[in-house]
Amino acid sequence: MVLIARLPLLILPLRRQAENREESGVSRKRREVTIETERVLVVSRRNSSPVLWCERCAREVTMLTVDEAAMMARSTSRVIFRLAEAGRLHFVETQEGRLLICSNSLEQGGRVDKAK
């Protein structure tokens, strides 16, 4: 019997708090905010990208540095190196040892969306 007598005393303050919230017009609402962004990439250099002969395309094409190719493909330099090693990207090595990627192969077969 004592337990039943105390139970309304515990519920009464909670009920009053709920009533006060309703009277003051305060209600809880959940809002979901979606933010959409768009990215525009402009690659600009003082010197234009070199136009060199690509053996596999059998024509002159614009060559890109590994970093430029990674930015264009929205990927990383590591992925570009792996695709070049796997033969999915055409490339030439300069006398200094720098790797230049054929822009034609990047546009056609070297899409890196699924490559890891």
Image (cartoon, helix red, strand yellow):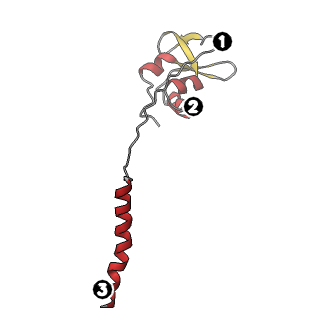
Please report the residue visible at 35 percent of the width from the left and 63 percent of the height from the top: 18
Looking at this view, name the residue that lies furthest to the front.
Answer: 23
Marks 2 and 1 sit apart, C-alpha to C-alpha, by 22 Å
- The mark that comes first in sequence, 1 or 3, is 3
Q: Which residue is mark 3?
A: 4
So how many labels did they put on this image? 3
In which quarter of the view is residue 14 placed? Answer: bottom left
- Foreground disc of the pair 2, 1: 1
- Amino acid beneath label 3: Ile
Q: Position of residue 70 (x, y in %)?
A: 54, 27
Asked if 46 appears above or below 36 in the picture, the reply is above
Q: Which residue is mark 2?
A: 77
Asked if 86 appears above or below 44 in the picture, the reply is below
Q: Position of residue 35 (x, y in %)?
A: 43, 35
- The mark that comes first in sequence, 3 or 2, is 3
Residue 46: mark in rendering: 1
Q: Residues within 10 Å of mark 1 (few under 14, many from 20)?
A: few
Mark 2: which secondary structure? Answer: helix
Marks 1 and 3 sit apart, C-alpha to C-alpha, by 85 Å
Is residue 84 or residue 107 the one in the foreground?
107
Q: Position of residue 28 (x, y in %)?
A: 38, 53
Please report the residue visible at 66 percent of the width from the left and 12 percent of the height from the top: 46
| Whether label 3 touches label 2, CB < 8 Å | no
Q: Is residue 23 left or right of residue 83?
A: left
Q: Is residue 94 left or right of residue 109?
A: right
Q: Position of residue 93 (x, y in %)?
A: 62, 20
- Amino acid beneath label 1: Arg
| Whether label 2 touches label 1, CB < 8 Å | no
Is residue 82 or residue 46 the one in the foreground?
46
- Amino acid beneath label 2: Ser
Is residue 32 or residue 114 the one in the foreground?
32
Mark 3: which secondary structure? Answer: helix
